Image (tube, grey):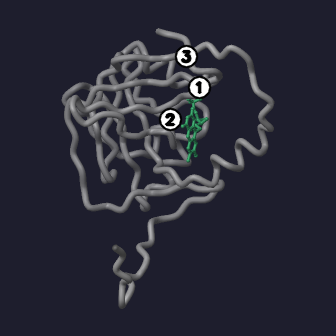
Amino acid sequence: MSIIVTPETPEIDPAEYRKIFGSLPTGVTAITGMTAEGKPMGLVVGTFMSLSLDPPLVTFCVDKGSSTWPLLRSLGRFTANILSTEQLPICRALSRKGEDKFADIDYTIGEHGTPHITEATAVIDCEVLSEVVAGDHYMIVGGVDSMVSSDADALLFRGGKFGDFNLWPAPANPEKKG
Ligand SMILES: Cc1cc2nc3c(=O)[nH]c(=O)nc-3n(C[C@H](O)[C@H](O)[C@H](O)COP(=O)(O)O)c2cc1C
């Protein structure tokens, strides 16, 4: 695991920092895996994103206070389940702390032994390739092994609220430039 070292900490107001980044919409992704005891576990992240197409890499960030990530880390694998607009209850279940988060969640076990949440927008099986300690978070880089998608709309999160993506109506007379 490598560590990112900053020479000095600039004076940034935490409330302003949270406000700015809270205004940026994110997807809602459940990172799932199996504990060493063979128990399904997961947590919700808004930081999941693509990193590279060739080779296919993804990344997400986990707070150092996460109780689930240390349990999943040792497996060396995870599944990123992009949650749909129908799956807010699953988001709520996996974004709380505690045991048995999967009690009311339908899932199957994928070919790599990790939980695939039923009817997610997409299910992406990954291998952990790298983990960087970055301030109060870990930044994980995963290599994509396989993926399955559906037509379900992805759930979005912004400013502490959930929603979906609304397309702007196409302009009747789009202005041409150049
Ligand atoms: C929409 C949303 C996005 C979140 N994004 C992240 C994230 O990117 N990284 C993170 O560590 N926690 C994130 N969280 C918080 C975790 O899901 C939450 O702290 C959870 O309780 C962690 O569980 P654990 O302690 O079992 O790992 C997010 C929560 C929500 C609802």
Q: Which amino acid, mark 3?
A: Val
Label 2, on which residue?
A: 43
Badge 3 density bin: few <14, some 14–19, many ≥20, Cα 10 Å: some
Residue 121 vs residue 102: left or right? Answer: left
Which circle, 3 or 2, is nearer the viewer? 3
Indicate the secondary structure of the residue bearing disc 3.
strand
Q: Which amino acid, mark 1?
A: Ser
Disc 3 and disc 1 in contact, CB within 8 angstroms: no
130, above or below 16, in the image: above
Badge 2 density bin: few <14, some 14–19, many ≥20, Cα 10 Å: many
Disc 1 and disc 2 in contact, CB within 8 angstroms: yes
Picture residue at 43% right of the left edge, 21% below the top: 72
Residue 113 vs residue 171: left or right? Answer: left
176, above or below 93, in the image: below
Which percent across, then down, holds residue 126? 29, 28
How far apart are the alpha carbons under marks 3 and 2? 18 Å
Q: Earlier in the sequence, mark 3 or mark 2?
A: 2
How far apart are the alpha carbons under marks 3 and 1? 13 Å
Residue 153 vs residue 54: left or right? Answer: right
Label 3, on which residue?
A: 133
Which percent across, then down, holds residue 100? 50, 33
Which percent across, then down, holds residue 159? 65, 55
| Residue at disc 2, CB closer than 8 Å to ligand 1 | yes
Q: Which amino acid, mark 2?
A: Leu
Res. 66 mark: 1
